[in-house]
């Protein structure tokens, strides 16, 4: 969270796209940082777009009742469907400085597909943050009853994606300043 807020403050996005909503805490968190940037006159109007395959009614209700909701839009559906990608691209077309945060299904194929679908939306000098790359460094079978594991996770997807997308680099300075992270080598900076 500390690294994420630091990157939001540093890059000043006007749109943060997040895959994976769960209870909505990260949407509220991102919206609050954008609100502070607005209050300080550093951005005009910031928005957060959350995408999830299943936004449960009780979570929707809580998110919609929060004061930060005025900065949040939620799309329900698969983040890897072409229909959703088109909808997100249309929504993002009015934004000038975009950050992407991937934190939904942690399988290799799912994360790789998200990177392919949305990586191009990230603005130069902004970031795509890929959470849960730590899975690759955990002992095999650390996640029983989950489809991801060592060899099939966000880190393996990032490695494959970076081989074909030189416009992104891993920002190792972030890893070096963090003592603990669930996203080692998951802070991808767009340099081109």
Image (cartoon, rainbow, N blue to C red):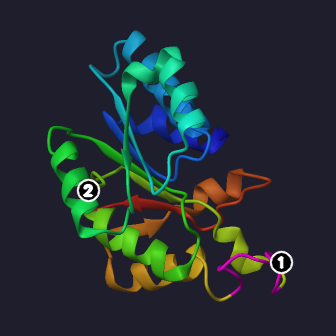
State the extent of the magenta-drawn residues as a range: 140-150
* Front of the two marks 2 and 1: 1
- The residue that label 2 is drawn on is 121
Work out whether residue 124 or residue 186 is closer to the camera in this orientation and state it: 186
Tell me how far mark 2 sits from mark 1, CA to CA.
33 Å
Residue 65, can we see it?
yes
Q: Give percent across and percent down for residue 2.
A: 66, 39
Q: Is residue 96 magenta?
A: no
Judge left or right: residue 85 versus residue 134: left
Q: Give percent across and percent down for residue 35.
A: 44, 18
Q: Earlier in the sequence, mark 2 or mark 1?
A: 2
SS class of the residue under badge 2?
A: helix
Work out whether residue 188 or residue 78 is closer to the camera in this orientation and state it: 78
Judge left or right: residue 125 versus residue 129: left
Picture disc at residue 142: 1
Picture residue at 34% right of the left edge, 13% below the top: 41
Picture residue at 55% right of the left edge, 44% below the top: 56
Work out whether residue 103 or residue 21 is closer to the camera in this orientation and state it: 21
The answer to which quarter of the image holds residue 190 is: bottom left
| On-image quarter of the C terminus | bottom left
């Amino acid at each position: 969270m500390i690294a994420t807020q630091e990157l939001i403050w540093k890059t000043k996005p006007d749109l943060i796209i997040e895959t994976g909503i769960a209870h909505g805490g990260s949407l509220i968190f991102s919206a609050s940082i954008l609100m502070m940037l607005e209050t300080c006159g550093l951005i005009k109007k910031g928005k957060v777009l959350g995408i999830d395959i299943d936004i449960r009614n009780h979570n929707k209700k809580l998110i919609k009742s929060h004061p930060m909701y005025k900065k949040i839009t939620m799309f329900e559906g698969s983040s890897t469907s072409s229909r959703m990608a088109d909808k997100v691209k249309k929504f993002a077309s009015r934004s000038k400085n975009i950050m992407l945060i991937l934190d939904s299904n942690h399988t290799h194929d799912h994360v790789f597909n998200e990177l392919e679908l949305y990586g191009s939306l990230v603005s130069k000098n902004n970031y795509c943050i890929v959470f849960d790359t730590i899975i690759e460094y955990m002992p095999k079978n650390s996640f029983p009853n989950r489809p991801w594991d060592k060899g099939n996770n966000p880190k393996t997807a990032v490695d494959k994606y970076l081989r074909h997308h030189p416009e992104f680099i891993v920002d190792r300075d972030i890893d070096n300043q963090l003592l603990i992270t669930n996203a080692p080598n998951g802070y991808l900076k767009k340099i081109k």
